[in-house]
Amino acid sequence: DAGVTQSPTHLIKTRGQQVTLRCSPISGHKSVSWYQQVLGQGPQFIFQYYEKEERGRGNFPDRFSARQFPNYSSELNVNALLLGDSALYLCASSLASGSIYEQYFGPGTRLTVT
Amino acid sequence: LAKTTQPISMDSYEGQEVNITCSHNNIATNDYITWYQQFPSQGPRFIIQGYKTKVTNEVASLFIPADRKSSTLSLPRVSLSDTAVYYCLLDSGGYQKVTFGTGTKLQVIP
């Protein structure tokens, strides 16, 4: 079975631009979470979506938004990019929303803001 | 959110057993303890999860004392491919608003 896929793998943007990152969960998984990982630090939780509804939000500004589609894929949008948004953005999927369900992470999208 | 504390780094020789301890003094009643492994430029990979006592799977064991204020991940007979960052995190039920700390960087030496 295919794992979690993310696109693009890498991208470079300029300050002030907007970016959209995409994630396809493992087949049958209804929960998708997004994380930001800055170099040298652990992943920081951004959002969780389950059955197309936002179920959790981390401590990120309103420039960050996300949505989940009927096929459970998800997009993360970041507006008005700042240099500090440069990071590895990870998507994780799980069967359901709850702590007993392990999360499967994708390879991430490396975003560089110049 | 309850915080976890782990050693920043550890070195071990190949073939040895490695124990990584995580402190979580303010763990909540409904928190599960979960460990992930991460290689450079990859997403984290689930290793093991537990609530109390001992859990064992094909790759690791997790020891949790009765007060649950700490936990120990045990990796038997490590190899060079176990060189990675290991994260201990607490995950309460409902929404997966999990918090990764800075992790423990394990270096396995030949």
Image (spheres, rainbow, N blue to C red):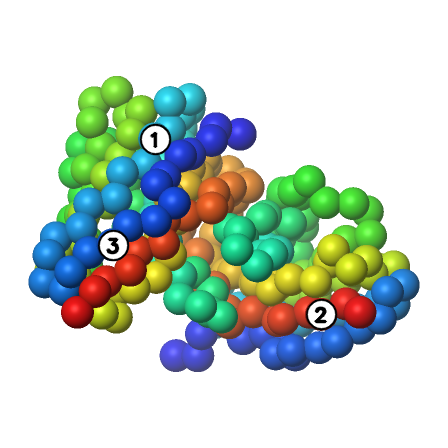
Q: Is residue B17 left or right of residue A19?
A: left
In whole angstroms, how far apart are the C-alphas of marks 1 and 3?
19 Å
State the residue at coordinates (47%, 43%). Answer: B101
| Residue B14, placed above or below residue B94 | below
Discs 1, 3 touching: Cβ within 8 Å: no
In whole angstroms, how far apart are the C-alphas of marks 1 and 2?
34 Å
Q: Is residue B82 left or right of residue A39?
A: left
Q: Secondary structure at mark 2?
A: strand
- Along the line of sight, which residue is nearer the eye, A70 or A76? A76
N-terminal-most mark, 1 or 3? 3
The quadrant in which the C terminus of chain A is found is bottom right
Is residue A30 among the parts visible in the rendering? no
In whole angstroms, how far apart are the C-alphas of marks 3 and 2?
32 Å
Please determine if labels 1 and 3 lie on a single subunit.
yes
Identify residue for label 1: B23
State the residue at coordinates (18%, 32%). Answer: B53
Residue type, mark 1 in image: Ser
Residue type, mark 3 in image: Asp
Residue B41 spot, x, y in % from top left: 49, 70
- Specify the quadrant of the image occupied by residue A6: bottom right
Residue B11: image tag: 3
Chain containing mark 1 = B
State the residue at coordinates (38%, 45%). Answer: B8
Residue A24 spot, x, y in % from top left: 58, 72
Please determine if labels 3 and 2 lie on a single subunit.
no
Is residue A1 among the parts visible in the rendering? yes
Chain containing mark 2 = A
Residue A112: image tag: 2
Residue A97: image tag: none
